[in-house]
Image (cartoon, helix red, strand yellow):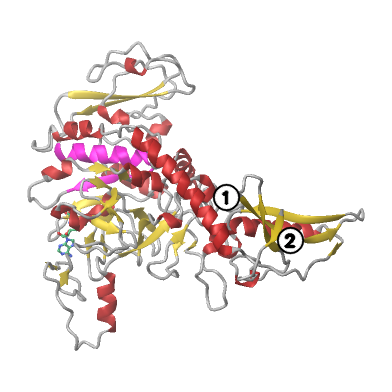
C-alpha cells in the first residue's frame, strides 16, 4: 500500500542536489510502501507525463538514500524532455528524512556486524614477523655492498600455469609481489598503473632518469621490471627463455619454461642501511610508488635498531583489531558513486552531492584543480574523492590523493631533529605527496615512544592528549611510510588535509594527506606544523598574551625565523 509521506518536514529546495542552482524544477512526492513481510520501502514519484501515443506514465523509483534521490531526479528530467505534456507539477514534496536514514543506517550496521563476526573467526596473519627477523639479521653489522653473491629470481608469466610455486626458489621479499595489500583493493593497484602513464609531469620521465643515478644499484625499478631489463645489464632479457636456479646459484631451475620472463638480480648481499632501503623500495614499488632512498651524511651512528624492524607500507594500513578493519571495509551500497566520465566540476559530480562547501555565489567548491590541491577547503573538512564504484576513469580530476606517489623521496639524517624527509625533485604548490599510513588503532594505552608518531583523524597530530572524538588514530612507530619521518617546523613546507576514497565519510577513518604548501625546491626538507592551531593563535594574538607552555613540551629546533620555541609533546 503506497502512502504519501506524512507531515512534510523538508522541501526539495532544502534537500541537497538538484540542478546547479540547488533547485528542483520537477517536483516529486516521497511515499512509503509496506511490503507483506512488514518492511518499509521508500519510493519517489516524480509526476505524470502524457506520452506522444496518448498514454500516461509516472516516473517512480525506489530510494534508500539521497544519492538515489539525485540520480532519480536526473532520470526524471530526461523523462520530462521526452514527454509531450506534464501534469502534477504542484504536488507537495517531502523527504521522510529520519525514517529513510534510520533504515539505511541499520542495514549498514547489520552488514558491518556480519563482516566483523566472519573476520574474528579467521586467525589473523602475523607472518611478517618472519620478515623482521630476516631484516634484523644484519642490523648490527655496518653497511656492506660486497659479500656473498645472492640471486633473486622473479618469474612473471604471460598466462597462468599450474607449475607448483614451490619449484621456484624465493626470498622472503616474494611475499610482497605486485598484488594488492589487504586494504588496497585490486582496482586501486590497476588504477595506479594507468595513472603513472597519464601523469608525466613530475613523476615519470625527468624523475626516473634522476632516480637511477641516485638509487642504490640493487634497486629494481618498476619501469625496468616491466621492460624486462636485467639490473646491471644493458641487455633486455624479455621473452628470452632463461631458466632460474636456486638463490646464489646460476644453475637453471626446472620449473621455468619457454616464454616465462625471468628477472635475475645478481645482487650482492645487502646489509644495514642498504638492505633497509632495498626492502622499502620493494614495498614502495609494489604499491606503484616511486623510489624511496635512505641517506645519512651525518656520521652519528647509522640506522637505529628499531628502524630495522620498521615495516614500510606506502599506501596500506595495518589493523591489529579485526573489528576496526571490518568497519573500514564498507559495503558497496553505502558508497556515493558518480556516473560522470570525467569529474571536472564539483557541481556536476554525484559524489559531491554531500558537499557543503560553496563559494560566495553558492557554487560547490572542488578540492583540486589541474591535479593540485587548491587550498579552498577549510582546515578540518574532509575531501571526498571518487571511489572504485564511480564510473569515471583514473584520469578523473577528483582522484588525486588515491594515486601512488610519483616523486622520489629521501629519508635523511638531519643535523638537529633525527631523521627527516625531502623530495629529490622540485615540487609545485598543491602537489599531493602521500598519505600517512601505519597501524589504525584506538590510541589509548600506547607505549610512550609511540606518542610522537600518532596522527589523529582530523589531520592534527596527537601529542599525548586525546579528545573523546579522536577514537581512531594512525600510529606509525613500527610501520608506515616516509611521512612518519616528517619533522615539525613553525614555517612548514607542507600542510595536511583529510581525504576519503576507499571508505565512506561516516566511518570516520579518512586518510591524512600531505600536500606542498608552496613551491618547494628539490632537496629542501619537507616539514609540517605539528600544532597548526598554535600558529593561528600566535597570528591572532596581540603579542601581549604569552602562550602557556605545556609541561611535556619539547624544545623546537626548526630554526625558523617564526619559531614558537617549543612543540607540544
Ligand atoms: C614524527 S617524528 C619525526 C621523525 C623523527 N625525527 C625520527 O627521527 O624518527 C616526531 C619526532 O621528531 C622529533 N622532532 C620533529 N620535529 C622537531 C623539531 N622541530 N624540533 C625538535 N624535535 C623535533 C621529535 O622527537 C618528535 O617527537
Q: Is residue 405 above or below residue 25?
A: above
- Residue 261 point in image, percent of width and height: 41, 23
- Residue 347 point in image, percent of width and height: 59, 65
Q: Quadrant of residue 520?
A: bottom left
How crowded pointer 2 is (Cα within 10 Å; few <14, some 14-19, many 20+) is rated as many
Q: Is mark 2 within 8 Å of ligand 1?
A: no
Q: Quadrant of residue 352?
A: bottom right
**Which residue does the image show at 38% across and 32% down from the upper left?**
225
37 with respect to 313 (left or right): right
- Residue 521 point in image, percent of width and height: 31, 62
Task: Pick out the residue farthest to the top.
Answer: 254
Residue identifier under label 2: 46
Q: Quadrant of residue 50?
A: bottom right
Residue identifier under label 1: 392
Residue 397 visible in the snapshot = no
Which residues are drawn in magenta?
Answer: 272-295
| Secondary structure mostly taken by the magenta-highlighted segment of the chain | helix
Answer whether residue 441 is magenta in the image.
Answer: no
**Which residue does the image show at 58% across and 53% down from the upper left?**
338
Task: Compare residues 473 and 280 and report the one nearer the observer.
Answer: 473
Which quadrant, please, contains the C terminus?
bottom left
Amino acid at each position: 500500500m503506497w502512502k504519501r509521506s506524512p507531515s512534510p518536514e523538508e522541501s526539495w529546495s532544502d534537500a541537497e542536489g538538484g540542478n546547479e542552482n540547488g533547485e528542483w524544477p520537477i517536483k516529486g512526492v516521497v511515499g512509503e510502501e509496506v511490503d507483506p513481510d512488514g518492511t518499509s520501502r521508500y519510493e519517489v514519484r516524480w509526476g505524470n507525463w502524457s506520452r506522444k501515443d496518448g498514454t500516461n506514465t509516472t516516473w517512480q523509483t525506489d530510494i534508500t538514500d539521497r544519492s538515489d534521490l539525485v540520480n532519480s531526479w536526473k532520470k526524471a528530467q530526461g523523462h520530462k524532455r521526452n514527454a509531450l505534456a506534464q501534469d502534477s507539477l504542484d504536488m507537495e514534496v517531502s523527504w521522510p528524512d529520519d525514517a529513510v536514514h534510520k533504515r539505511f543506517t541499520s542495514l549498514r550496521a547489520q552488514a558491518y556486524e556480519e563482516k566483523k563476526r566472519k573476520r574474528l573467526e579467521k586467525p589473523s596473519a602475523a607472518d611478517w614477523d618472519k620478515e623482521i627477523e630476516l631484516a634484523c639479521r644484519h642490523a648490527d653489522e655496518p653497511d656492506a655492498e660486497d659479500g656473498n653473491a645472492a640471486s633473486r629470481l622473479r618469474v612473471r608469466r604471460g598466462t597462468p600455469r599450474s607449475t607448483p610455486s614451490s619449484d621456484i626458489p624465493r626470498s622472503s621479499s616474494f611475499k610482497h609481489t605486485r598484488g594488492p595489500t589487504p586494504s588496497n583493493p585490486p582496482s586501486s593497484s590497476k588504477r595506479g598503473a594507468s595513472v603513472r602513464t597519464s601523469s608525466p609531469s613530475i613523476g615519470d620521465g625527468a624523475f626516473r632518469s634522476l632516480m637511477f643515478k641516485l638509487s642504490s644499484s640493487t634497486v629494481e625499478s618498476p619501469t625496468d621490471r616491466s621492460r624486462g631489463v636485467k639490473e646491471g645489464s644493458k641487455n633486455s632479457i624479455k621473452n628470452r627463455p632463461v631458466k632460474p636456479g636456486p638463490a646464489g646459484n646460476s644453475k637453471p631451475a626446472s620449473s621455468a619454461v619457454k616464454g616465462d620472463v625471468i628477472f635475475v638480480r645478481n645482487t650482492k648481499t645487502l646489509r644495514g642501511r642498504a638492505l633497509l632501503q632495498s626492502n622499502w623500495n620493494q614495498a614502495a614499488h609494489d604499491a606503484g610508488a616511486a623510489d624511496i632512498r635512505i641517506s645519512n651524511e651525518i656520521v652519528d651512528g647509522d640506522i637505529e635498531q628499531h628502524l630495522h624492524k620498521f615495516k614500510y607500507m606506502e599506501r596500506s594500513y595495518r589493523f591489529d583489531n579485526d573489528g576496526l578493519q571490518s568497519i573500514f571495509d564498507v559495503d558497496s551500497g553505502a558508497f556515493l558513486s558518480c556516473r560522470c566520465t570525467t569529474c571536472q566540476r564539483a557541481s556536476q559530480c554525484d559524489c559531491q552531492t554531500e558537499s557543503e562547501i560553496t563559494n560566495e555565489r553558492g557554487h560547490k567548491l572542488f578540492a583540486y584543480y589541474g591535479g593540485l590541491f587548491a587550498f579552498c577547503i577549510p582546515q578540518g573538512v574532509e575531501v571526498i574523492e571518487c571511489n572504485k564504484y564511480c564510473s569515471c576513469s583514473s584520469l578523473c580530476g577528483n582522484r588525486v590523493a588515491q594515486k601512488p606517489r610519483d616523486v622520489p623521496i629521501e629519508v635523511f639524517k638531519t643535523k638537529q631533529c633525527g631523521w627527516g624527509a625531502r623530495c629529490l625533485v622540485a615540487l609545485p604548490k598543491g602537489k599531493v605527496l602521500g598519505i600517512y599510513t601505519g597501524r589504525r588503532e584506538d590510541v589509548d594505552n600506547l607505549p610512550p615512544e609511540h606518542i610522537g608518531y600518532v596522527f589523529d583523524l582530523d589531520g592534527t597530530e596527537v601529542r599525548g592528549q586525546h579528545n573523546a572524538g579522536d577514537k581512531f588514530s594512525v600510529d606509525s612507530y613500527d610501520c608506515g611510510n616516509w611521512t612518519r619521518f616528517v619533522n615539525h617546523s613553525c614555517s612548514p613546507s607542507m600542510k595536511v588535509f583529510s581525504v576519503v576514497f576507499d571508505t565512506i565519510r561516516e566511518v570516520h577513518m579518512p586518510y591524512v594527506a600531505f600536500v606542498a604548501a608552496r613551491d618547494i625546491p628539490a632537496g629542501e626538507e619537507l616539514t609540517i606544523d605539528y600544532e597548526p592551531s598554535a600558529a593561528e593563535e600566535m597570528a591572532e594574538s596581540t603579542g601581549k598574551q604569552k602562550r602557556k607552555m605545556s609541561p611535556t613540551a619539547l624544545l623546537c629546533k626548526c630554526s625558523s625565523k617564526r619559531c614558537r620555541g617549543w612543540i607540544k609533546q
